[in-house]
Image (cartoon, helix red, strand yellow):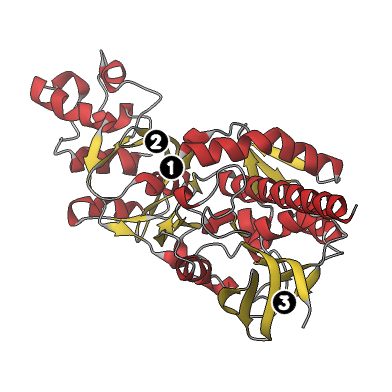
Amino acid sequence: MKIYDVLILGAGASGLMFASQIDEALHVGIVDVNDKVAAKLKISGGGKCNITNLEVSTNNYDSKDEIVSNVLSVFSKEDLLDFLNKNGVKLELRKNRYYFCKDSSDEIIDVLKKLTRHVEMLLNTEIFEAAKVDDIFHIKTSRGILKSEKLIVATGGKSYTILGASEVGLKIAKSFGLKVKEFSPALVGMTLQKEQFWMKELSGLSCHVHIKVGDKILNEEMLFAHKGISGPAVLSASLYWQKGNMSINFLPQNNIFDLIKGSKKQLSSVIPLPKRLSKAILEALGIDDIECKKITPQVLAQLQKIHNYKFAPAGNFGFTKAEVSRGGVLAEELNPSTLEAHHVKNLYFIGEVVDVTGELGGYNFQWAFSSAVVCAVSVERNYSWACKSSKNNIN
């Protein structure tokens, strides 16, 4: 039975990027349950894939700072943009923040396919488990046992089960004794307690807000949905919320006291939000929609809460609606400079299967690509050293 130099589990963004960077002289294989590569890349961002962001730093990730800072220092946002530009992928910047493929996510998928033509694609192949026997990895799959000297686990998270997502990466990590954090939904809409059901009555409306969770402030659009609240601000807030209160500033661009000062209009008319929303917020705060000149000190105190509406979400919409998974192989189990497991030689974890989760806005694809490159550089260096060492021994 042949033994691969490198076997990659997962043909998503990180797995393909790793394969695109590895020496063509090596015998490399990619195993994936899907019949096509890059299934998640294909559908992300409405088919145009939000690849990265104008500003990328450790502050945009829920993770151990060391592993993210190390990885981004080797392959930064600028490096990714340069890679895409050199390979003819045209991008467009939306909202002065988000980089998307200009025409279609197929642009980057086609580049990755082209750069991995030297790799053996083992698609439509389910992965069951992995073990190490005499320094060789044995991977049990639906097409039998596959063997490899190095194993790259790029199996992703648990969201998008329709695309074959599973927890097999965590299963493999645990079988080798690595500590993991079980997957949970992230970048996902949030459900509400009974006291906030008034928001569900506004389904379809959206507004620009600041959402505060702990010491994080998320600045984006919030969408009212029939199941609760969603939209970019809420999805990013869900990354940091565990339980307890969060707060919404419904008027981040204005001061409510400046708006009502000297006005003879009704309260709902001076609040620069859709009238339905203005009235609903006032009702939720227990404030009558009165003329501004009739406002009492007691009403003023309540009105201030429009900038700091505190509540505790009931939960989230679950994995079926989650953009990504939070959790994975704990960063402390991996060398932050190589992504190799500290205690299992030649076993690497990259992409979403690692306990690094970014906010909404291209940060998770940035992590996928960056971690893949860091890992590939390490594997390349390892093989180069091994070849030189072998030659020296022969001489």
Residue for badge 3: 123
Whole-angstrom CA distance, mark 1 to mark 2, is 7 Å
Q: Position of residue 281 (x, y in %)?
A: 25, 40
Q: Position of residue 56 (x, y in %)?
A: 58, 34
Q: Is residue 76 something that shows in the picture?
A: no
First along the sequence among labels 1 and 3: 3
Q: Quadrant of residue 261?
A: top left
Local crowd size for mark 1, using a 10 Å CA cut-off: few (<14), some (14–19), many (≥20): many
User: Looking at the image, which is closer to me, 212 or 266?
Assistant: 212
Look at 21% across and 22% down and name the residue there.
292
Local crowd size for mark 2, using a 10 Å CA cut-off: few (<14), some (14–19), many (≥20): many
Local crowd size for mark 3, using a 10 Å CA cut-off: few (<14), some (14–19), many (≥20): some
Q: Position of residue 313 (x, y in %)?
A: 26, 51
Please, what secondary structure does the residue beneath circle 2 have? Answer: strand
First along the sequence among labels 2 and 3: 3
Instruction: Indicate which label's residue lies in the foreground, 1 or 2.
Output: 1
Do the numbered discs 1 and 2 sit on residues whose CB atoms are within 8 Å?
Answer: yes
Whole-angstrom CA distance, mark 2 to mark 3, is 44 Å
First along the sequence among labels 1 and 2: 2
Residue for badge 1: 233
User: Looking at the image, which is closer to me, 229 or 145?
Assistant: 145
